[in-house]
Image (cartoon, rainbow, N blue to C red):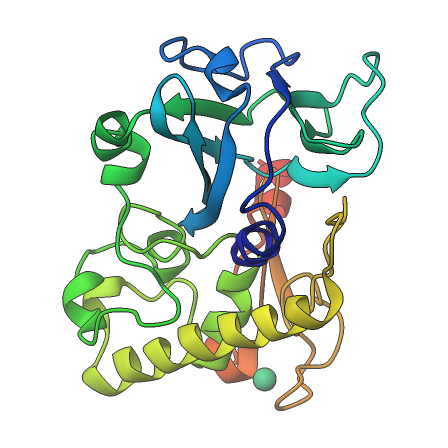
Amino acid sequence: MEIVARRLDAALPGERIESAMAPGINALKTFDPPLQALEGATFSGARRRGKLLMLDVETPSHGPLTLLLHLMSAGRAQVFDKRASLRDRTSRVLIRLPGDRELRVREFGTKQAAWAKLLTPEGLAAEESLAGLGPEAWPDPPADLRELLAAPRPLHALLRDQRVVTGIGRTWVDDILHAARLSPFKRGNDLSEAEADALREAMVGELQRVIDVYEEKVQLPLPEKFPKPTLVHAHQGEPCPRCETVLEAVFYEDYVMSYCPHCQTEDRVLKDRRLSRLLK
Ligand SMILES: [Zn+2]
């Protein structure tokens, strides 16, 4: 989302909105101010907080407003030179720009989970989805991670909990824990000071590495599929990039947790929950 915000923030400011539509059923979660308030508005910037994208506009009728977007896992914000066909069923929000161009929020797959809210500055300040977020994992997470993570929950769950720390998902958590040489099942309140420092360094380092790749490879109109430069996540069966032990994985219903038994779990191979469920 960081790279999406950066690219949109470079492209949109100063652009005038011709019209806006929300063809996705239930994608737009607010009705006041109405979406039509965007007509004739000018973009002033794009920002990110956690996985949420904020598009700031100055409107002729309602003053400054923010279009808050949560793309979830299958949503994309893209800028196209040509407008979408009205039959494009992936369209959730369409913002028409001069010269046939369009900022399009689309969602792939069967779930309709992505959402948008059009908010006043007061509405944005009171917005629950933002107020509940923990501190950002990148670029400068809190110095004392032990305090932040002091809960009897496994790191793999804790680090993905956006209320605890925001900006880490199912993909990068594996690479971060591997870089820090920590077991995904180690409890947050079980971290030594040295381990917490290693984790902080891994968080900043791994997320920076990913952003650097995106910075080089991701350009407008913004892709449907982003590169995933993982070293560990989803690389089970391949050698560990550090010690060459074969990477293992635990399979959950809709995601996989990959790790190195040698670097992270004292040479223990963790129980495969999918397999154990099948055997029950
Ligand atoms: Zn290893």
- Residue 4: horizontal and vertical position, in percent? 59, 52
Q: Is residue 266 above or below residue 257?
A: below
Can residue 182 be seen at all in this image of the molecule?
Answer: no
At x 35%, y 47%, the residue is 162
Q: Is residue 122 above or below residue 46?
A: above
At x 84%, y 12%, the residue is 87
At x 71%, y 67%, the residue is 235
Direction bottom: furthest residue: 243
Question: In the rendered image, which quarter is residue 180 located in?
Answer: bottom left
Drawn side of residue 255 relative to residue 136, left or right: right
Q: Is residue 8 above or below residue 32?
A: below
Quarter of the rendered structure image containing ligand 1: bottom right
Q: Which of 225/56 is in front?
A: 56
Q: Which of 149/89 is in front?
A: 89
Q: Which of 33/237 is in front?
A: 33
Give the quarter of the figure containing the C terminus. top right
At x 63%, y 91%, the residue is 243
Q: Which of 100/238 is in front?
A: 100
Question: In the rendered image, which quarter is residue 200 located in?
Answer: bottom left
- Residue 265: horizontal and vertical position, in percent? 46, 75
Question: In the rendered image, which quarter is residue 197 located in?
Answer: bottom left
Can residue 164 be seen at all in this image of the molecule?
Answer: yes
- Residue 86: horizontal and vertical position, in percent? 81, 13
Drawn side of residue 279 relative to residue 32, left or right: right
Q: Is residue 175 above or below residue 64?
A: below
- Residue 60: horizontal and vertical position, in percent? 42, 22
Drawn side of residue 274 relative to residue 59, left or right: right
